[in-house]
Image (cartoon, rainbow, N blue to C red):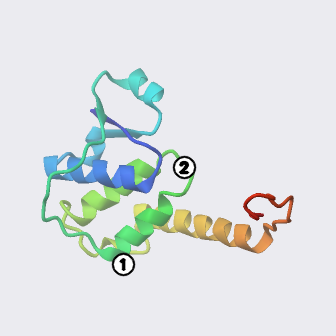
């Protein structure tokens, strides 16, 4: 089992996932975490995300949009699920996986995207700002 420690953001996951795909590492062989201390509890084989080598793996644009949104969710299992779906879409031979609404992984991604979208909407709809002060030197509020 390989432990991958990443920053909790989409770009870090994407770089690490590219590297793992080029190595052909199956999702069941990867433990994803964004906490370095947690990673050391499970194995001594920690891997930091590094820039990937150039490869020609094709990923559907719809997956990239969904993955970016799902990565904003707070569930700790999101990185592993995103990699599993990516693996199935590319090396697993399930190119039309995202069109199968009854698939458990796809359904979970959709639920996370919906929850993130709902939270974004609530933040835009209900968060209000008020003027606290104005900086006399710069005029900034």
- Residue 67 in the image, given as x and y percentages of width and height: 41, 63
Q: Nearer the viewer, residue 87 or 38?
A: 38
Residue shown at 24% from the left, 72% from the top = 95
Task: State the SS at label 2.
Answer: loop
Query: What residue occupies the far bottom of the structure in this picture?
Result: 99
Residue depicted at x 44% and y 64%: 68
Q: Quadrant of residue 5?
A: top left
C-alpha span from label 2 to label 1? 23 Å
In which image quadrant can residue 130 be found? bottom right
Quarter assignment of residue 60: bottom left
Residue 64 — which label?
A: none
Tell me the quadrant of the picture where the N terminus can be found: top left
Above or below residue 107? Residue 84 is: above
Within-10-Å neighbours for mark 1: few <14, some 14–19, many 20+? few
Q: Quadrant of the C terminus?
A: bottom right
- Where residue 52 sits: x, y (%)? 20, 50
- Of the two numbered discs 2 and 1 on the same chain, state the one appearing first in sequence: 2
Q: Give the labeled residue for mark 2.
A: 75
Mark 1 highlights which residue? 99
Q: Position of residue 16 (x, y in %)?
A: 29, 47
Q: Is residue 53 left or right of residue 75?
A: left
The extreme front residue here reads: 137
């Amino acid at each position: 089992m390989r432990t991958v420690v990443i920053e909790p953001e989409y770009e870090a996951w994407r770089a690490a996932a590219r590297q793992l795909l080029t190595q052909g590492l199956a999702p069941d062989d990867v433990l994803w975490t964004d906490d370095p201390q947690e990673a050391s509890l499970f194995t001594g084989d920690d891997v930091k995300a590094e820039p990937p080598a150039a490869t020609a793996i094709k990923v559907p644009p719809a997956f990239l949009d969904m993955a970016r949104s799902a990565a904003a969710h707070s569930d700790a299992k999101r990185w592993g699920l995103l990699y599993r779906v990516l693996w199935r879409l590319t090396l697993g031979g399930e190119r039309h996986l995202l069109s199968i609404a009854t698939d458990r992984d796809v359904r979970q991604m959709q639920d996370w995207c919906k929850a993130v979208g709902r939270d974004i909407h609530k933040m835009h709809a209900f968060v209000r700002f008020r003027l606290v002060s104005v900086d006399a030197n710069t005029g900034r509020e």
